Amino acid sequence: MLKERIKLLTGDVPAREVSDLTDPALIARINEVSAACARNRAWLDANIDALLPGARGKVVVVAGQEAFIADTYVEARGRAEARHPDDPGPLVERFPLVDLERV
């Protein structure tokens, strides 16, 4: 197990190909998803105090600038998709049970 972890960290890393993104449809889709995710992030940042402490230990999915809180990702994501099926950028967070000090 340790040898496998060392191998992952030090060797046999596959080469990566870097290329320019030129497909206008793909660029538009990436921008759409990014903008939706940014809107959901801004909503979460503005409403975090209303969600906590009730969201501690739970999964929070924000879609359509609305929070869906559940014990599992599948449940929270399912609720979000049912309510906002066209949101291309849902945001997923999991808040620890206790507020940990940040360093």
Image (spheres, helix red, strand yellow):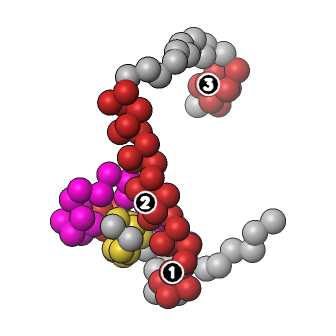
User: Is residue 26 shown left or right of residue 12?
Assistant: left
User: Which mark, residue 47?
Assistant: 1
> What residue is shown with label 3?
8
Q: Earlier in the sequence, mark 1 or mark 2?
A: 1
Q: Is 10 in front, or is 54?
A: 54
Residue 52 at least partly seen: no
Q: Callout 1: few (<14), some (14-19), or many (20+) C-alpha neighbours within 10 Å?
A: some
Closer to the camera, 82 or 24?
Answer: 24
Residue 64 percent location from the top left of the image: 33, 67
Q: Which residue is drawn at 60% across and 16% down?
A: 13
Mark 2 is on which residue type?
A: Leu
Q: Residue at x 50, y 64 (%)?
A: 41
Q: Which of marks 2 and 3 is nearer the N terminus?
A: 3
**Residue corresponding to mark 2:** 91
Residue at (44, 20) in percent of width and height: 22
Residue at (55%, 16%) from the top-left corner? 18
Whether tag 1 and tag 2 are in contact, CB under 8 A, the answer is: no
Query: In x, y percent, where is residue 69?
Result: 36, 75
Residue 67 magenta: no
Q: Is residue 100 left or right of residue 89?
A: right
Say which quadrant the C terminus sits in.
bottom right
Helix, strand or loop for disc 1: helix
Q: Which of marks 1 and 3 is nearer the N terminus?
A: 3
Magenta residues span 78-97
For badge 1, the amino acid type reads: Asn
Instruction: Identify the amino acid type marked 3.
Output: Leu
